Amino acid sequence: MAIENKREEEFHTVFSRNDSLELSCHHEYDPAKARIFKIIVIGDSNVGKTCLTYRFCGGTFLKNPEATIGVDFRERTVELDGESIKLQIWDTAGQERFRKSMVEHYYRSVHAVIFVYDVTSLTSFHSIPDWIEECSRHSVGPLVPRIMVGNKCDLRDRREVPTSAAQRFADSYNFPLFETSAKDPAEKEHVDAIFLTLAYRLKSHKPLRLKQPSVSNVTQLWNQSEQDEGTCQC
Ligand SMILES: Nc1nc2c(ncn2[C@@H]2O[C@H](COP(=O)(O)OP(=O)(O)OP(=O)(O)O)[C@@H](O)[C@H]2O)c(=O)[nH]1
Ligand SMILES: [Mg+2]
């Protein structure tokens, strides 16, 4: 299914700021209902995790977000090949003091992990190994898909993390890499595509196959195309 053809009405979005974790710590399969997948979004404070998840679930750029405390839950149900898939997205806190009591919950029964850095912050990029390490420490299995997202591509003049360096790093972990902007309206579909790529991956339980190192272009992943000379869409 092409992203471009996806109709807005196929999406059902629910927002919740929810202190209860009970809902979120299991994965159940019921053919009568949407399958639920838990995706955690991890990375330094201020990289744009909240704005990215809000962009995907709400379709707009969240102005003046506050630092996330603990976790914010967002959900979006998508229809993929006739099946409803509910993506339950855990927008985690980047600040240590706001996350320390929650970390165990973040990783429990997680189905996919999105590591986010800010392309204008080398520091946030250099933190990614620490986030990967935290993930491993919490027994997230090797088969749980992980992707990397470099956010704030709209700030072209302030870029500190070259695509080539990020791509080399991502390749060394065998993670697909995406660069995007939660802010730039022109990137809306790309943000959708990043999450939907994961959704397809989770639905099919097949590994993402990247034919050669490149900044991942979702359509290529989608079609498993032989010609994946992907470039940043920013
Ligand atoms: N220019 C630009 N600014 C962005 C983008 N995404 C987020 N921001 C800004 O970056 C700041 C931090 O965004 P958040 O989404 O709150 O960051 P976070 O990673 O959730 O931070 P914590 O909740 O503290 O972990 C805010 O001022 C946003 O407006 C983007 O794509 N481009
Ligand atoms: Mg946040």
Image: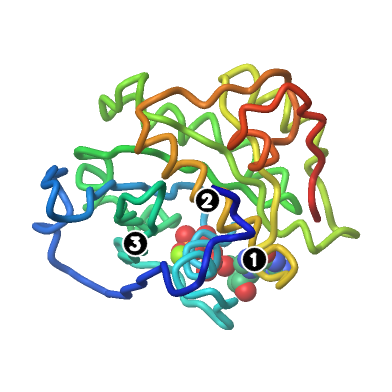
| Mark linked to residue 188 | 1
Disc 1 marks a residue whose amino acid type is Lys
Disc 3 marks a residue whose amino acid type is Thr
Residue plotted at (57% across, 77% down): 60
Mark 3 — residue? 77
Q: CA distance from mark 1 to mark 3?
A: 17 Å
Above or below: residue 203 compared with residue 153: above
The picture places residue 139, in percent across and down from the top left corner, at 26, 25
Compare residues 151 and 221 and report the one nearer the observer: 221
Mark 1 lies on a secondary structure that is helix
Label 1 packing within 10 angstroms: few (<14), some (14-19), many (20+): some
Disc 2 marks a residue whose amino acid type is Asp
Compare residues 107 and 186 and report the one nearer the observer: 186
Mark 2 — residue? 44
Label 3 packing within 10 angstroms: few (<14), some (14-19), many (20+): many
The picture places residue 22, in percent across and down from the top left corner, at 9, 57
Compare residues 217 and 167 and report the one nearer the observer: 217
> Which quadrant is the C terminus positioned in?
bottom right
